[in-house]
Image: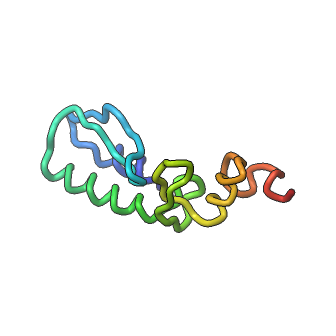
Amino acid sequence: MSLVDQVFDRLPPGLQVKQVYQKWAELRFDLSDYDEDFEKFIVEIAAQSATLCGVCGGAGYHHCIDGWEETICDVCRARAETRIDGPPGSDEDFER
């Protein structure tokens, strides 16, 4: 299950996710209100996201690509640096 799905599955009643985004190579959430327990869970999700490739979901590492901080695996990083979009195996460009 994706990290975003985990957040939505545990979302307390009355609380809404206003925005999901990446900042400093971590997954972030803007919520409609503050809930201390859920905020702790969100911090755990952010820490997990810092270890997962944002493209393919495999083990990722913190990299700076074209000035953007990202958590990405070595294969997806190579694809990003050569401007090939998507995870490995999603097209034939990686084979070239």
**Closest to the observer, 50 or 36:** 50
Relative to 21, 93 lies left or right: right
Residue 93 picture location, percent across and down: 81, 51
Residue 6 position in % (x across, y down): 38, 51
- The image's colouring method is rainbow
Residue 71, image x and y in percent? Answer: 48, 58
Viewed as shown, does residue 22 lie left or right of 93?
A: left
Which residue is pictured at 32% across the width and 42% down the height?
29
Viewer-closest of 14 and 24: 24
Looking at the picture, does residue 12 appear above or below residue 44?
Answer: above
Q: Give the residue displayed 53% in from the left and 68% down from the top.
A: 59
> Could you say which quadrant of the image residue 30 lies in?
top left
Image quarter of the C terminus: bottom right
Is 89 situated left or right of 3 in this image? right
Q: Tell me where residue 95 appears, x and y as whole percent.
A: 84, 59
Q: Residue at x 66, y 64 (%)?
A: 75
Q: Which residue of the protein is positioned furthest toward the front in this rendering? A: 67
Please identify the quarter of the rendering in which residue 15 is found: top left
View extreme (right): residue: 96
- What residue is shown at x 44% (from left), y 65% (from top)? 51
Drawn side of residue 42 relative to residue 90, left or right: left
